[in-house]
Amino acid sequence: MNIIFILLLLCAAFCAVMMSIHDWRARIIPDVWLFPFLLIGLLVVGFFPWFFDTSEAIIAAAVGYVLSFGMGIVFEKIKKTKNSPVGLGDVKLLAAGGVWLGVTGLAIALVVSTLLGGIWGLRAKQKFIPFAPFFFAGMICALIALLFLI
């Protein structure tokens, strides 16, 4: 049983790396890596000891989806353009992150990833910031916080 858990975590890490690389290069998060990441998260939360139960994972996924979709609409209205800076891949990524992290972990990951991405964007003078690499860094920080601090 532990080997299956470790294999699932390794597959999820591989999907996260592939999404980060693709988002960094092409500014798109492909569903071919995102949906397995989401499904692996549901398997881990549902069948293995995790920080919370499946119901909180589903609630956190919905919160992540609605929150990021709402941010995209707000940014679109502020910039008064038809192109939202928050893409649908980012919206789905936050939903998947909610499955892995729960509501508390998702909040921690969002704060960390926003700070890291904002600092990188200011230093590199970038107009577009790839969200996935910074979100996965925030996820790692949130998992560490959930494990040791909360």
Image (cartoon, grey):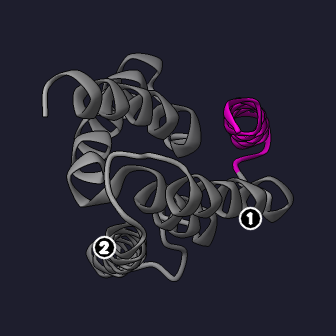
- Crowding at dot 1, Cα within 10 Å, few <14 / some 14-19 / many 20+, comes out as some
Nearest the eye: 44 or 100: 44
Nearest the eye: 80 or 8: 8
- Residue under label 1, please give it: 35
Residue furthest to the left: 150
Query: Which quadrant does the N terminus fall into?
Result: top right
Up-down relation of residue 35 to residue 83 (above or below): above
Q: Position of residue 143 (x, y in %)?
A: 36, 32
Residue interval drawn in magenta: 1-27
Which amino acid does the dot numbered 1 rest on?
Phe
Q: Position of residue 64 (x, y in %)?
A: 37, 68
Which amino acid does the dot numbered 2 rest on?
Leu
Nearest the eye: 55 or 136: 55
Asked whether residue 113 is drawn in magenta, I would say no
Query: Which quadrant does the C terminus fall into?
Result: top left
Residue furthest to the top: 123
Q: Which mark is residue 67?
A: 2
Seen in the image, is 61 located left or right of residue 128? left
Residue furthest to the right: 32
Up-down relation of residue 39 to residue 142 (above or below): below
Residue at 86%, 60% in the rendered image: 32
Seen in the image, is 72 located left or right of residue 108? right
CA distance for labels 1 and 2: 19 Å
- Secondary structure, mark 1, is helix
First of labels 1, 2 by sequence position: 1
Residue at 33%, 46% in the rendered image: 51
- Look at the magenta stretch and give its main secondary structure: helix
